[in-house]
Image (tube, grey):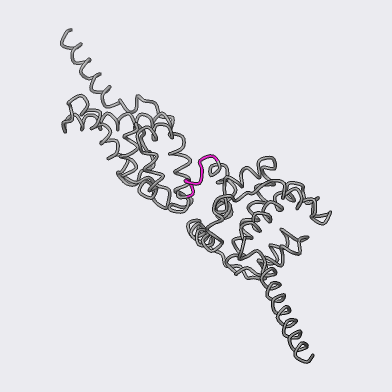
Amino acid sequence: MRLLSTTDRKSTLGLLILGLGLTVVSGSTPARAGTFSWLDEVVQQIIVEARGGGKAVLHGGEAARLEARGAGRLFAHGSEEGLERLVKRSDELALAARRVEHPSETLLQSRFSQLMATDADALRSFSALKPAEKRVVVEMGESARRIAQRYPQEAETMVRKLGPEGLTAVRAFGDDVAEVLVKEGPESLGVLRKTGKGGWEFFTTQVLPHKKKLAAAGVLAAFMADPDKFVDYAGQATEYAAREFAKAGITLATAVGGGAARGLEASIGQALARHGLDLPVFRYLGMTAAVAVIVAALLVIFGMPLRIMFWPFTRVARLFTARRLKHSV
């Protein structure tokens, strides 16, 4: 009987230890197993509440949770990488945007509470994350809220196309990059990461308007693969960019130093070579004509009449005409 009691006590102790272990594992939040599933639900709920103007929060957030669950997954891609990989990419984007921040855990907890104030389970799960992971989750949540407020009808579609890294890019560079990222795809993230805001401006003002021409000439693919060869961190085109764009028949006006001029010279040289006239004298004449056209265009832009430009020539012509008339008389 005593032996049976001892056995019962051991069994009871074993069950208690097992139950405690299961509680720890299940209560360790989805931060380890299924982090992206939890993050997916959080972002979806934030979108629903932001789109509803906070009305869902007034009802305890249950309506937002139900609507979010029926929307389907947002982050189908990238979930295999985990939050650690996302933290690294987020840091790269923040560095490119020159917006490196290290908020305290207290501040991060406060910001997340503003996003998910009515969801106690989400708050507990958030508390178990590492500091860097908390920062990324808050950044993604705040970006999703701004997108939902600005594009209420397209919010889920945009967030799905942006993906986790795209949301962190929106946080780092501002809402204006969201539309281009959605339209051009995740490949355009490399432009932001490698060249920053200056390179992004070059991408939107010089590359995208001539996308078809550049694609046909093979320049677009080269730019997307290695954008920092085309543009510096200040957003100025390089000499290499001037040469490559000239292949597509596009002249860059923002090339660094003499890059644009050399790119124009190369373009003129290629045009002359097709006619067997690629000689220094013809190239020199072509550059002179191009410069004359540029100067004339500047005079027109600044409101100066073209006769000022041709004044020396007209002066000589008048003198010559007057002398001929004098001799004829």
Q: Which secondary structure is most common in the magenta stretch?
A: helix
In reply to whether residue 188 is colored magenta, the answer given is yes
In the rendered view of the protein, which quadrant contains the N terminus? Answer: bottom right
Say if 18 sits above or below 328 in the image.
below
Give the farthest residue toward the bottom. Answer: 2
* Residue lying at 50% horizontally and 58% vertically, measured from the top left: 89
Say if 60 sits above or below 285 in the image.
below
Q: Nearer the viewer, residue 321 or 37?
A: 37
Which image quarter: residue 220?
Answer: top left
Which image quarter: residue 278?
Answer: top left
Instruction: From the viewer's perspective, tell me whether residue 85 is left or right of residue 15.
Output: left
Q: Nearer the viewer, residue 155 or 85?
A: 85
* Residue lying at 70% horizontally and 69% vertically, measured from the top left: 27
Which image quarter: residue 285?
Answer: top left
Residue 203 x/y as whole percent: 45, 43
Residue 255 x/y as whole percent: 36, 43
* Residue lying at 70% horizontally and 43% vertically, measured from the top left: 152
Say if 15 sits above or below 195 in the image.
below
Give the farthest residue toward the front. Answer: 1
Give the farthest residue toward the right. Answer: 59
Residue 93 x/y as whole percent: 50, 56
Span highlighted in magenta in the image: 183-189
* Residue lying at 64% horizontally and 60% vertically, measured from the top left: 138
In reply to whether residue 214 is colored magenta, the answer given is no
Q: Nearer the viewer, residue 97 or 236?
A: 97
Residue 222 x/y as whole percent: 36, 43
